[in-house]
Image (cartoon, helix red, strand yellow):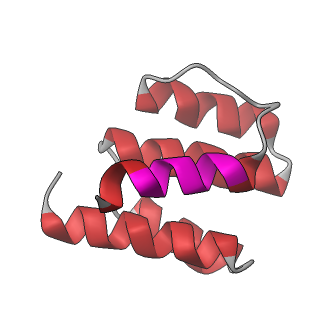
Amino acid sequence: MGDVVRDDVVRAIDLALAGEWDDAHDLVQRHEGNATAAWVHAVLHKIEGDISNSRYWYRQAGRPADVDADPQAELRTIREGIAG
């Protein structure tokens, strides 16, 4: 993952954790085709309550659709994995 993508995904996670769903969503949409951005996108739609769209993005990320997992914890896990 390139630095720009990683920085945007980390920023999107931080925004989502702060309750700024729309801004987080805008950032991850810029990186369609990136699996980690798609994973964050899935979690954002889970937060929104759009489970069918969330499942779509989990598929794009190549991840199981864990729609019952706590989204805040899942975002922190993603962030830890990419922020190093």
Residue 54: image location, x then y, percent: 68, 38
Please state which of residues 80 and 58 is positioned toward the viewer in this rendering: 80
Residue in the image at 64% along x and 70% along y: 16
Residue in the image at 45% along x and 57% along y: 79
User: Magenta stretch containing residue 2, yes or no?
Assistant: no
Residue in the image at 59% along x and 78% along y: 15
As drawn, is 10 to the left or to the right of 2?
right
Residue in the image at 78% along x and 54% along y: 47
Please state which of residues 60 and 14 is positioned toward the viewer in this rendering: 14
Q: Is residue 31 shown to the viewer in this render?
A: no
Please state which of residues 44 and 69 is positioned toward the viewer in this rendering: 69
Q: Is residue 6 shown to the viewer in this render?
A: yes
Query: Which residue is situated farthest in the left direction here?
Result: 2
Numbered marks: total: 0
Q: Over which residues does the magenta segment extend?
A: 73-80
Please state which of residues 53 and 40 is positioned toward the viewer in this rendering: 40
Residue 57: image location, x then y, percent: 55, 36
Of the 4 image quadrants, the one containing the C terminus is bottom left
Q: Relative to residue 83, is residue 58 depicted above or below? A: above
Residue 60: image location, x then y, percent: 45, 30
User: Magenta stretch containing residue 74, yes or no?
Assistant: yes
Dominant secondary structure (helix, strand or loop) of the stretch shown in magenta: helix
Residue 42: image location, x then y, percent: 60, 43
Q: Relative to residue 68, is residue 4 depicted above or below? A: below
In the figure, residue 48 lies in which quadrant?
bottom right
As drawn, is 48 to the left or to the right of 23?
right
